[in-house]
Each structure stands twice: as structure tokens, then as C-alpha cells.
Amino acid sequence: MKLRKKTGAAALSVLLAFTVGTGFVSSAENEQDALENKSLEELDTLKVKNNVRLETLQRGIEQARKQYESASKKEISKKEYAKKLDEKIALRSENLECTVRQINMLETEAYNTNTMIGDIENEISEYREETDEALELYKQHLRISYMSKPDNLSAVFMGSSSFSEILTRAELVSRIAGRDRQNLDALEKKLEELSVLDEQLKFKKQIVDGNLEAVSARRTELDEDLAEMKEDYETVRSELEKISGEKQKFKDEYEAKRSAVEEKRKEQDKITKAIKEEQARLKEEMEKLEEEARKQKTIPGGVKRRTSGTSQINVSSDSKNMLWPVPGYTSHSSFYGYREFDQSEHKAIDIQGNPNDTIEFAKIYAAESGTVVTACNYCTHSYGKNYSCGCGGGYGNYIVLQHDDGVYQTVYAHCYTVYVSEGEHVRKGQLIGLVGSTGYSTGPHLHFEVRKNGEKTNPDSYTYINYG
């Protein structure tokens, strides 16, 4: 690359002075006057700042929207969980009530069984006493009967007055002994029945006590579960209140930033309108000055030097050398040819900032006069990225300028913004955009191509006019 500095006449300065009449002026008129009293450079700077602010607000809106959606999803999830907890608590409460009823029934049954066991044991004790008495009486009668056997009939005879009385006495003794045996058998049978009933009642008591113990343990478990669920429910209700507050906060933030974006867009529209009006006015004024200069023959084939802060660098269109597109910035981040870091053929040069001087928002000027055949200006992703956002086929915001000679084209890619439109004819040195990092761009730079008859050539093989 060969850069050649040129000197010329003093830079063209345009003084904008507007007088404002006395009296009442509305805020809108004051705002319009404020814009009208700014130079084109100041308007460009204001537009860039507004664009940065708009992007910041847009990211804030997106963040607030995502936070609101996230909070809404959390709220729905927590409400569903709270609903399930309500159902579980109701079911546990119902189970607990049923368990309490079972405990009451089992306690009543256990009490009744214990009472019955006590009654049976008392009855057994009474029957045992009766049985012991009957057994003793039976033994006595047996002894008497024994004494009444034939070898002892003399004792019976001696106490009897007649044979008939002897027979009567012997029969009576035998009958008494028989009744004693029947009474004793009946008592023993009753004792056996009572003992069986006592065993059955004691077995039943074991079952009732076991059931009571199991149901009581179940009640303890239900009480603990219910207490834990209620505590969890209160926690969820507290979280829901917090989430609801966060939702409202994010919603308010979203609405506030959305309103701010609308205001900034209106302001940007006014600035854009003011820029177009000022560009038209400057263009008309410069054309008049150049016409006068040509008539006076003061700049035949000459080049007027302008600073990089203007909207037009006045350079003769018949100069054989192209204008360097970003005056003051000549450092390369990528050269023409094979590129190692992404293993690709780079058919352009990437112009980057100088040390301690970023190239972002630097002004881009048309390298040559020509017609804009492509002007892409819809990419808003102006930040460093290791991927392509897809805008402009990876070029982001870019311009393709067909030179008036019909042979060459120049391409200006990854622009922050583009100031020209397709079909528009631009003059050499005209401001056409600002450097950015849109499309597939790892940082702010200008991707600059020079095409000859449609073939990409090395931009560094040409000589340029540089005003930096």
C-alpha cells in the first residue's frame, strides 16, 4: 500500500448561525433550533451516541423481557406446586381424621375388652370357690357312702329301727353322692368354658393393642408429614409473593425502557432529518463554491485538504489515485491472502484502530466517485463476535460502490451505519458511513475490498490519497 499526502487550499469551513426571535418558543421549536444550530459533525456524533444508547436500551428491554418471562414461568411452576401441596395437605388431613377415629374406636374396644377380661376373671374366681366347696362336699358324701357298703351295714342297722329304714338310709346316701358329682361336673365344665373365653379375650386384647400401636404410629407419621407440608406451603407462598414483586419490577422496567426507546427513536428521526437537510444544504453550497472556483480557475486539477471530521473531503474526481477510506487509520488486522487463524483466503484488507485510538465510529469516505449498487443497513449487532449473525451475508452493514469508470468497485463492510442508499451517486471523498463491528466481525474494523471487473484484487497494491 502506498499512501501519499496532499496539500491544497485551506479547508472549507461552513458557519451555521441562526438567530432566534424574541418571545415565546415551544419546547419542540427549541429542540428543533438546537438541532439546526449543530454542525454536521456534531449531528453525526449525536446520532452515533443515540444509536449506542438505543442499542443499550434495546438490550435492556430484551433482558427485562427475558427476566419477566423467567419470573412468570417460576410463578406458574410455584403455583402448580402450591396447588399440589394443597391437595396433599387436604388428603393428609382427611387421613389423619380417619386415623384419629380408628384410634378412638380401638381405645374403646381395648377398654371394653379389658373390662370383659376382668369380669370373666372375677367369675372364674367365684366358680373356682364354688367348685372347691362342691368338691369338698362331694368328698364328705363319698366317705359316708363308703361307710355305707355291705361290710359296714351293721352300722346302718344299728341306727335303724326297721329294715325299711335301713334301705331308705342307704339309698339317700347314694343319691346325695350322685348329685354332688353332677354339680361338680357342671362347675368344672363352666370353669373350662370361662377359661377358654378368657384366653380368647386375652388374644383379642393382644390384637387390639397391636392395632392401636400401629395406628398411633401412623398418626405420628401423618402429624409430622402434615407439619412439614404446611411449612413447605408457607415457604412457597412467601416465594410467590417475592416472584410477584419481581415480575412487577421487570414489567415496570420493560415499560420504562420501551418508552425511552420510543423517545430515542423520535429523537433519532429528528437528527436523521436534520443530517439529510444539512447534507443537502452543504452539497448545494459546495457545488456553488466549486463552480465559482472553476470559473476563477483557482483549483484546476487541485485537491483541497479537509479534516477527517467533515462530511465531505473535497478532492478532485479526476485524480488517478483513490482516496484512503478511513483517513488517519492505516494499521491492518488482516491482510489480503491466506489467513492462518481461520484458514481462509481473505480477499480484502481489514483496517483497524491505532494504539490507544479505537476505529469504532470513525468516518468512512468514498474512495472514488460512483454509484451505490448495494447498501445494506439493517444489522443492529454491532459488537465483537466469533460467529456470524447472518446479516448482510456476514458483511453486516456494507456498501458496494461501482466507480464511474465501470471497471472498479470498492466494498466497505462491517459498518456501524450506512449513510447512502442504493442507486445514489456519490462523489469521491463523500461521507458514506461509520466503522462498526456488524456481521461476522470479532471487533471494530473496516473490511475494504477493491474489485476489478468483478475480480477481487489486493487493495494494498494501489496508491491512495490520505488526509489523516
Image (cartoon, helix red, strand yellow):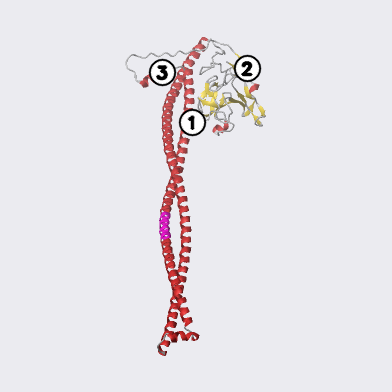
Q: Which mark is residue 34?
A: 3
Q: Quadrant of the N terminus?
A: top right
Looking at the image, which residue sits at the far front?
158
Say whether disc 3 or disc 1 marks the residue closer to the N-terminus: 3
Q: Position of residue 229 (x, y in %)?
A: 45, 46
Q: Is residue 446 above or below residue 97?
A: above
In the rendered image, which residue does mark 2 sit on?
Answer: 3
Real-space CA distance between mark 3 and mark 1, rounded to the nearest whole angstrom: 29 Å
Distance, label 3 to label 2, CA atoms, is 39 Å
- Amino acid, disc 3: Ala
Q: Quadrant of the C terminus?
A: top right
Residue stretch in magenta: 98-111
Earlier-in-chain disc, 2 versus 1: 2
Depth check: give the residue in front, 355 or 404: 355
Residue type pointed to by label 1: Arg
Query: SS class of the residue under badge 3?
Result: helix
Question: How many neighbours does mark 3 have within 10 angstroms: few (below 14), some (14-19), or many (20 or more)?
Answer: few
Splitting the image into 4 quarters, where does residue 247 fall? top left
